[in-house]
Image: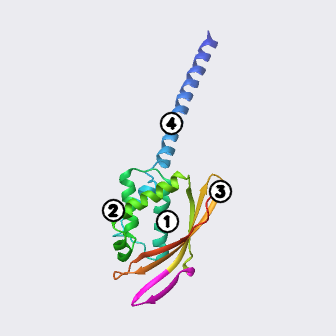
Amino acid sequence: MKNMYVKIIILFALAIALVLSFYFYLSNIREQSTGENQVRASKVTEALMRNLDARYPPTPKEVVRFFAEITQCLYNDNYSQGDFEALGRQLFRLYDEELAENNPWEIYIDNLRFDVDSYRNREFVISSFTVSSSTDVIYFSEDGFDYARLHCLFSLRRSTDLYIIDHQFLLRRGENGRWKILGWQKEEPEYE
């Protein structure tokens, strides 16, 4: 009879230990998941949330970097039609007034959609990009304007094939001191 009480006490102690262990396990998982799953915005959301009125990129390099980040989102990520147009608007806001006037919004967004669809249909993904270092930015003045010229290399991947596209950007400083993209040229490889 005494052995039976001892067994019951041991089983009861084990049950309490098991319940407490399970409670601490759940508490620990909840704390970890709360830390890991804090609201982390996707790259698309981050690009859309950037307020260019308050936080416009201060240098030509940063303007091109933001351009490349948005471009990578457009070509790689999944998003709604509304997000596509909002990303296009963010790009459009980086353009110099002269470039924007030569590319009316309706034509610009249709051309952008065609270009993105074309790359996606050929199953290309922008795996990375590299913007010129600050020391490689060429600054010059002409006709009363300040200009900057720099490169951005986009690495495109399709299956196991890798292609490098070199974009040479020309930016002009506006009256408000902001650098805007005046245009670019790209050297694309022959795709198979």
Q: Which mark is residue 106?
A: 2
Colouring method of the image? rainbow
Question: What amino acid type is highlighted by mark number 3?
Answer: Asp
Label 1–label 4 contact, CB within 8 A: no
Q: Nearer the viewer, mark 1 or mark 4?
A: 1
Specify whether 2 is left or right of 35. Answer: right
Residue at the spot of label 1? 68
Q: Nearer the viewer, mark 2 or mark 3?
A: 2
Q: Nearer the viewer, mark 2 or mark 4?
A: 2
Residue at the spot of label 4? 26
Mark 4 element type: helix
Q: Looking at the picture, tell me which residue is in the foreground, 159 or 46.
A: 159
Question: What amino acid type is highlighted by mark number 1?
Answer: Ala
Where residue 121 appears, as percent x and y from the top left, is 52, 51
Where residue 27 appears, as percent x and y from the top left, is 49, 39
Quick one: label 3, few (<14), some, or many (20+) residues within 10 Å?
Answer: few
Residue at the spot of label 3? 161
Q: Which residues are magenta?
A: 135-148
